[in-house]
Image: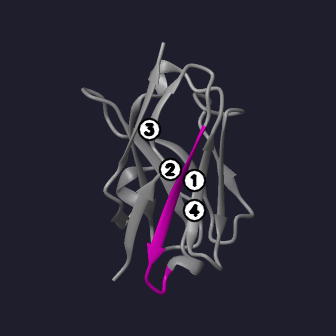
Amino acid sequence: QVQLVESGGGLVQSGGSLRLDCAASGRTFSSSAMGWFRQAPGKEREIVSAINWNGGSTYHPDSVKGRFTISRDNVKSTVYLQMNTLKPEDTAVYYCALRGGMNLRMQTWEYDTWGQGTQVTVSS
């Protein structure tokens, strides 16, 4: 059984930064790709970042490219999302997800385990 716990969300002003942490328990983390997703009220859940099993490959959509950076520490079984130059449109609940495979993926249905989410609110 794998469990994911996000932390690091909060309230920041436009232009500010946050780092989200996702701590994983279970034996599959070190061989699993990870993703960060977000969901705002009334909107579908969307990917904001993904990383393969060893951190050698990452993905960010255009909406966050250049502002968000995903990284992982397989010794600590933790994945991070560094968010810089935050905008009000980044406001959402952010979820960490694990897919149980080594290659990164971009769709919600390709992930097996989800954290509880952490709220990120960016004020104007």
4 or 1: tag closer to the N-terminus? 1
In the image, what residue occupies the spot 57% across and 62% down? 79
Alpha-carbon neighbours of circle 4 within 10 Å: few (<14), some, or many (≥20)?
many
Name the residue tied to disc 2. 106
In the image, what residue occupies the spot 50% across and 50% down? 106
Q: Position of residue 98 (x, y in %)?
A: 45, 66
2 or 1: tag closer to the N-terminus? 1
Looking at the image, residue 35 sits to the left or right of residue 60; the answer is left
In the image, what residue occupies the spot 64% across and 76% down? 74
2 or 3: tag closer to the N-terminus? 3
Between the C-alphas of marks 2 and 1, the distance is: 7 Å
Kindly report which numbered mark, 3 or 4, lies closer to the viewer in this rendering. 3
Alpha-carbon neighbours of circle 1 within 10 Å: few (<14), some, or many (≥20)?
many
Magenta stretch contains residue 22: yes
Looking at the image, residue 20 sits to the left or right of residue 65; the answer is left
Badge 1 amino acid: Ala
Between the C-alphas of marks 3 and 1, the distance is: 21 Å
Q: Position of residue 91 (x, y in %)?
A: 42, 28
Kindly report which numbered mark, 4 or 2, lies closer to the viewer in this rendering. 4
Magenta-drawn segment: 18-28
Front residue of this view, candidates 61 and 66: 66
Looking at the image, residue 37 sits to the left or right of residue 57; the answer is left
Kindly report which numbered mark, 4 or 1, lies closer to the viewer in this rendering. 4
Between the C-alphas of marks 3 and 4, the distance is: 18 Å
Name the residue tied to disc 3. 10
Between the C-alphas of marks 2 and 3, the distance is: 25 Å
Q: Secondary structure at mark 4?
A: strand
Q: Are marks 2 and 1 in contact (CB under 8 Å)?
A: yes
Q: Secondary structure at mark 1?
A: strand
